[in-house]
Image (tube, rainbow, N blue to C red):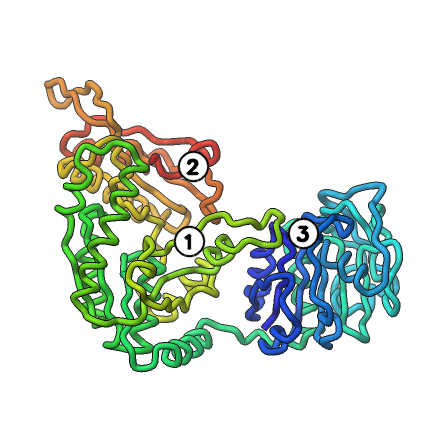
Amino acid sequence: MIAILDFGSQYNQLIARRVRDCRVYCEILPHDVTPASLKAKKVEGIILSGGPASIFDKGVPVSREGIFDLGVPILGICYGVQLMAHRLGGKVTASPMREYGPAELVLNKAGKVSLIFAGLETRQRIWMSHGDRITKLPKGFRIAATTVNCPVAVMENPSRKLYGVQFHPEVHHTVNGIAIIQNFLFRVCGCSPSWTMGSFIEESIGQIRERVGGERVLCALSGGVDSSVLAVLLHRAIGRKLTSIFVDNGLLRENEAEEVVSTFRDQYHLNFRLVRAGERFLKKLTGISDPERKRKIIGREFITVFEEEAKKLGRVPYLAQGTLYPDVIESTSSFGGPSVVIKSHHNVGGLPAKLKMSLVEPLRVLFKDEVRELGRELGLPESLVGRHPFPGPGLAVRILGPVTKDKLAVVRKADSIVREEVWKAGLFNHVWQDLAVLLPVRTVGVMGDGRTYENVIAVRAVTSTDGMTADWVRFPHEVLERISSRIVNEVKGVNRVVYDISTKPPSTIEWE
């Protein structure tokens, strides 16, 4: 267990990912976590994150007294090293030359024998982002490396296992950053790369059983990656004590409901309840064009349907949610810097408050790609764990304008063709998301010897790492040709296909 104390860095999650990539478990904790809490967690090391503040600012975030006396190895990054120097009797001043961007780090005699630079060259490219610098070392510390503008780029006290770097080893632009983190984890902290999905499964099963005892648990199963992995993990832990409810809202992709039923009821033998509610949702959406109203209507109706089904089961004390670690971080305000609340997280539309159930969230310590890895470890098919993102409101937000049964049939078939052709071309794993959108326009066309006046389908495919930014996919022309030809020939009522070449920003991935 490595504790990452949050001082507001935009790179907090990136630090955590670098540690997890080394197969060492870590958690991001508030900057003012108590030494007693860290002892209770049996941390083997602490990383003090960077942050936007200066130690001269009013209300500056600081660690609790006693953190540096725990006898646990500590690595301070950027603001973290300045805080370390300040709290331990050193001096930090405003730098006459701020550093933002690349710099060359030069190891001195001490740096060449430093544990965190073991096996690394004397000169290396790093990434800086700071306006203050250390001008006086705390007692017992020594300088291990410098840059042209930063005389204390690295400081260390090996006897106390305290290290501080003014640069950001977690970012890609620091060439040996991952090696520095590995040296801290393995050479300084003595960690072992033993945190695997197999060990996570065993730990989670024990924790779930301890939490719920012999009580029943309810799970809202959507067929998406998170809820699917959650359901299978819970089923392995408590078996028939888990009831999974799958609401078919009539807005799903082609054959999606049948695939969910086949996978979870027939293959995994979950205690599974299918609710066919497509007509209810479609009736509620009649005449609605505004995308935000569509979303709210679908969300409210889902809660109503789920609540009705839950009441049929009698008393069920626990509700399972597929909350992930980014959801936890985005929903938790830091000390007031940039790590403010990004979104209030309602994994299943506010169900816990309405149903008065306690939450079970075994995935809340994982990132998205770790959930995919967990799903593979649990034996879920690649077609499920590797699936592209799909919006909660489903195809309703891929129909611009009012939603009807006929329009759903058009966009559902077009979507199926896009996915099939992307898969056949061997491009599925190179695409973050692909989709088809039914536009509220009709155009003139020619089919056979006759004039047509039919609908337009817009095709969109993007690459991304996190969905926050995205670029359009440069499909080979022959792939686009097959997609267009098949949609026009196989989807009744469509005579034109266009390809969306917008980036995000300024455009979003979905059209609504």
Q: Which residue is mark 1?
A: 345
Tell which of 347 and 172 is nearer to you. Answer: 347
- Please identify, in this view, whether the residue under mark 1 or under mark 3 is nearer the observer: 1
Q: Which picture quadrant has residue 140? A: bottom right
Q: Which mark is residue 472?
A: 2
Q: Name the kind of residue labelled 1 in the image.
A: His
Q: Position of residue 322 (x, y in %)?
A: 37, 61
* Res. 11 in view: yes
Looking at the image, which residue is at 48% across and 56% down? 326
Q: In the shown orientation, is residue 63 left or right of residue 114?
A: left
Q: Residues within 10 Å of mark 1 (few under 14, many from 20)?
A: some
Tell which of 221 and 353 is nearer to you. Answer: 353
Please identify the quadrant where the C terminus is shown: top left
Q: Position of residue 361 (x, y in %)?
A: 40, 66
Mark 1 vs mark 2: which is more N-terminal?
1
Please identify the quadrant where the N terminus is shown: bottom right
Q: Which picture quadrant has residue 272? A: bottom left
Between the residue at mark 3 and the residue at mark 2, the CA separation in whole angstroms equals 33 Å
Looking at the image, which residue is at 71% across and 53% down? 60
Mark 1 vs mark 3: which is more N-terminal?
3
Q: Name the kind of residue labelled 2 in the image.
A: Trp
Q: Which mark is residue 51?
A: 3
Tell which of 442 and 416 is nearer to you. Answer: 442
SS category of the residue bearing label 2 = strand
Between the residue at mark 1 and the residue at mark 2, the CA separation in whole angstroms equals 28 Å
